[in-house]
Image (spheres, helix red, strand yellow):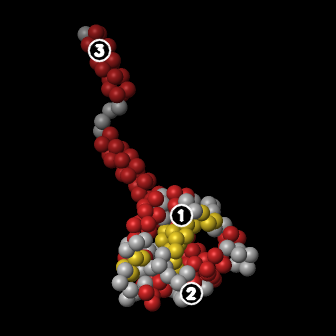
Amino acid sequence: MSYIAKSPWVVHYDGSSCNGCDIEVLACLTPMYDVERFGIINTGNPKHADVFLVTGSVNEQNKDVVKQIYDQMPEPKVVVAVGICACTAGVFRECYNILGGVDSVIPVDVYVPGCAARPEAIIDGVVKGLAVLQEKRDNMVKQVDEPAETYEKEEAEASEGEKSPEEEAAGETEKDQEGGKQ
């Protein structure tokens, strides 16, 4: 299944930041950039999202929220860290309550640096994230298909030299008939 076949849904969360990247994410939704032309749809429900777009750094107050949103998303999922704060905690790195970038709490697939990240870079990051999402989907399909193929192969190897129940029943019937002739 191609990632273009299904419109990817993006859930956005803004952590600890100056909100500059948050404004740029909103700019992506305006007619000037029109991110929906790529089929990318913004959602407020993580249970429907394929891509988790995070702006801002992670602190003691929001680390659990970031984890909850991530955990609620179905597999496969992609995390895109937008802006230097989401990537490395940026200028807030030395603050007492900042834990770091998003990758200090959840795994990140794509980093979009910048302060503030440009809308073109954000869109490019999401599109790169969709390629990662496709790889993850392909790997999931392989993992599901491989055990079935292995099972079928093992069963075929085990059944070599063995008779099926129908063949065994037919063989017993022949023996009974031969035994009755003597």
- Judge by depth and name the residue closer to the eye, 66 or 146: 66
Front position among marks 3 and 1: 1
Q: Identify the residue under disc 1.
A: 50
- Amino acid found under the numbered disc labelled 1: Asp
Q: Quadrant of the N terminus?
A: bottom right
Give the amino acid at mark 3: Asp
Give the residue number, with chain letter if any, for mark 3: 176
Q: Residue at x 38, y 46 (%)?
A: 152
Three-letter amino acid code at the position of disc 2: Ala
Among numbered discs 2 and 3, the one appearing first in the sequence: 2
Residue shown at 47%/79% (left/top)? 16
- Under circle 3, the secondary element is helix
Q: Position of residue 12 (x, y in %)?
A: 55, 70
Where residue 22 sits: x, y (%)?
Answer: 57, 78
| Cα distance in 3D space between marks 3 and 1 | 64 Å
Tell me what residue is drawn at x 30 percent, y 42 percent.
Answer: 158
State if disc 1 and disc 2 touch (CB < 8 Å): no
Image vertical order of residue 59 relative to residue 8, above or below:
below
Residue 25, position as x, y percentages in the image: 61, 77
In what element is the residue under mark 2?
A: loop
- Asked whether residue 169 is in view, the answer is yes
* Mark 2 vs 1, N-terminal side: 1
> In the rendered view, does 8 fall on the left or right side of 16?
right
Mark 3 crowdedness (10 Å alpha carbons): few <14, some 14-19, many ≥20: few
Residue 41 falls left or right of residue 154: right
Residue sitting nearer the eye, 111 or 18: 18
Q: Of marks 3 and 1, which one's residue comes earlier in the chain?
A: 1
